Image (cartoon, helix red, strand yellow):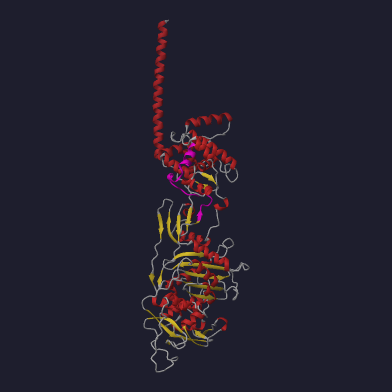
Amino acid sequence: MEVIRESSLLRMLRRVKRLIKLGIFLVLCASFVLLLFILYLRSQPLPAATINQTTTIYAQGGEVLDTLHQGENRVVVPLSKIAPSLVQATIAIEDKGFYEHYGFDLKRLAKVVYINVTSMDKVQGASTITQQLARNLYLTMDKTWERKIKEAILAVQLELNYSKEEILEMYMNQIYYGESAYGAQAAAQTYFGKDADKLTLAESAAMAGFPKGPSIYNPYKHMDKVKSRQKLILQAMQADGVITAEQAEAAYHENLVFRDKSAQRQVLSAPYFRDYIAELVKSKYGIDEDQFLHGGLKIYTTLDYNMQKKAEESFAKHLPKENADLQAALLSVEPSTGKIKAYVGGRDYAKSQYDRVFSLRQPGSSFKPILYLAALQNGFTPLTLMKSEPTVFKYDNGKEYIPSNFGDHYANAFIPMQQAIATSDNIYAVKTIEQITPQKVVDEARLLGITSPLQAVPSLALGTSPVSPFEMTAAYTVLANNGEKIPLTAITKIEDNQGTVLVEETAAKTPVVDPASTFILTHMMQSVFEPQGTAYRVANMLNRPVAGKTGSTDYDSWLVGFSPQLVTTVWVGYDEGKKIDPIKDARVAAPIWADYMESALKEQPPALFDIPAGVTSVYVDMETGKLATEHCPTPKLVYFALGSEPQEYCTDHLPNPNEKPKPITPPEGTSVWQRVRGLWNP
């Protein structure tokens, strides 16, 4: 019997030994398979993930003009730009074992599986931070076992490909906090109006609770639930040893001040300008719609926020409230750089998004400076005389053109160019284009930046070919720059979400017109704001040298002009073929222009127009067109291209005909500014 028992024991030991070997073999095989599986997962690329980010448009001074996120507001920031307290609070409440597991927590998973099986329902989740990131990046929110398996596999892949800090950074930038805010930075701005790295412990503990149920834990609706979850998170942080009991208590009792919800999406400035920026980004710089809306771009523009506000205030002040159909546009540019400083495409963007800055309208007499610039380069001077009287012009083999002056007012005498500009004499203008030919005016306009079709006919002198306020501003910028052309610029730089510069504008001036001629024209255009000038009614609103030209048609009213620091175009009219009232409507453009120019430049001292080489100035007796003497009653300072100035003195007013004429010299003790101001605005 003992032999039999011993034999049975040996057989049992051999079986155990074989089972142990089999177990070891199976463990080794399983380990090998697991290793192969891990190596396979490590070698497989993760699915492509699209992380939408908010594109931000900035004004020149850093003010935010707009944020574009199409309902998914996200600004990706590095982990170092997120408050440590928010990261700690998130780990404490979402995944205590984050630094110990490899994508999923087996203990937590087993517990949850048991609870779900016993309840015969999926009542509790066990997702780690890594699994949540995998789900948000690559999967749907379906509660199926298939999705959970995929989630676990993707979580392992994330752990194999990224460090814990990288996973945390992705997670903190990905998760949804409610109120269209995705990621910690957007949420911190949305709820507290501050950057994510400036959050306090109390704010962090509150915000870390929002992702659990953004609608349930919404501070604007359920503050009691927010405080309850905040307390739970603070207790979890204390249990993890990252804060003390005293810190938890103090944070819980800290008063949470949430950003006023109405301020989260304030009415932003320059809506027409923002539309223009969107068009430029796509058409000029080749950035597609998806990258523009979701790529987290930083678009830096030239707009001066304060000047833009002044422009909008001028519209509100001078456009008649009782006539809501009357529209207007304003474009303002810094001539030395070509940078757009203010841009208003209409009086009310909410009612009409049509941008009138690019609307083609007849410029009327505001086109005349282009004509006169061409004339100055073809032998004319400020003293060139034409007779202002009703005239019938014949062209193109017998065609007749019969222009008239406003109100049928004519000098019925020979007048110089300077007077023709001030009074906007149409007969003088048409006689001028007849002498130099319409084609030369077309050529001049092209040099200045007018690109719209222009008809080379006598009526072109009176601005009958439609152009846009944008084109008129570009042309007058050349005048303000003494003949140098510079592209009008709205964007200075575009960066992608990594800070890589995609676009950087560097505008350069190009000489296109004789500087002497442009300065002489500029000086004559200052007379528009003098007595008898067409804009004299607003001269009392201005306290600096300005030059410009009004323009009126049956449908349009313009004032285009400039100081040395700013070029501005204002257009007023109706959108759909309605004539303007020559008294009420036509008198609106000038006060908008003057009010804006003076307020926009309020902080800048008055500046004089630079006199280029090749220009000389003399006092002229305007009645005779000769050099004025001290006895002439109405001498006027006139600028000429060197060599084209009068050489003879006026002798009509000398008390003694035999007396040698004496030239006029500026009064002593007065500055250049005082003398110029006295001439410009007596």
Q: Nearer the viewer, residue 314 or 479?
A: 314
Q: What is the magenta range?
A: 66-92
Instruction: Please determine whether, in this image, residue 255 is positioned above or below residue 321.
Output: above
Instruction: Examine the rendering and report whether any part of residue 361 can be seen.
Output: yes
Location of the N terminus (image quadrant) = top left
Q: Nearer the viewer, residue 541 or 178?
A: 541
State the residue at coordinates (41%, 25%): 26
Q: In the rendering, at what x and y percent does residue 652 appear? A: 44, 91
Quadrant in the picture for residue 25: top left
Instruction: Please determine whether, in this image, residue 403 is positioned above or below residue 285.
Output: below
Q: In the rendering, at what x and y percent does residue 576 appear? A: 59, 69
Q: In the rendering, at what x and y percent does residue 11 appear? A: 41, 13
Q: Is residue 226 left or right of residue 155?
A: right
Looking at the image, which residue sits at the far right?
322
Instruction: Examine the rendering and report whether any part of residue 127 can be seen.
Output: no
Q: In the rendering, at what x and y percent does residue 397 appear? A: 49, 85
In the image, residue 90 lies in the stretch drawn in magenta: yes
Q: Is residue 304 left or right of residue 225?
A: left
Looking at the image, which residue sits at the far front?
669
State the residue at coordinates (47%, 59%): 59
Quadrant in the picture for residue 34: top left
Q: Is residue 220 left or right of residue 666?
A: right
In the image, residue 180 lies in the stretch drawn in magenta: no
Instruction: Please determine whether, in this image, residue 501 is positioned above or below residue 486.
Output: above
Instruction: Please determine whether, in this image, residue 28 is positioned above or below residue 468.
Output: above
Q: How many marks?
A: 0
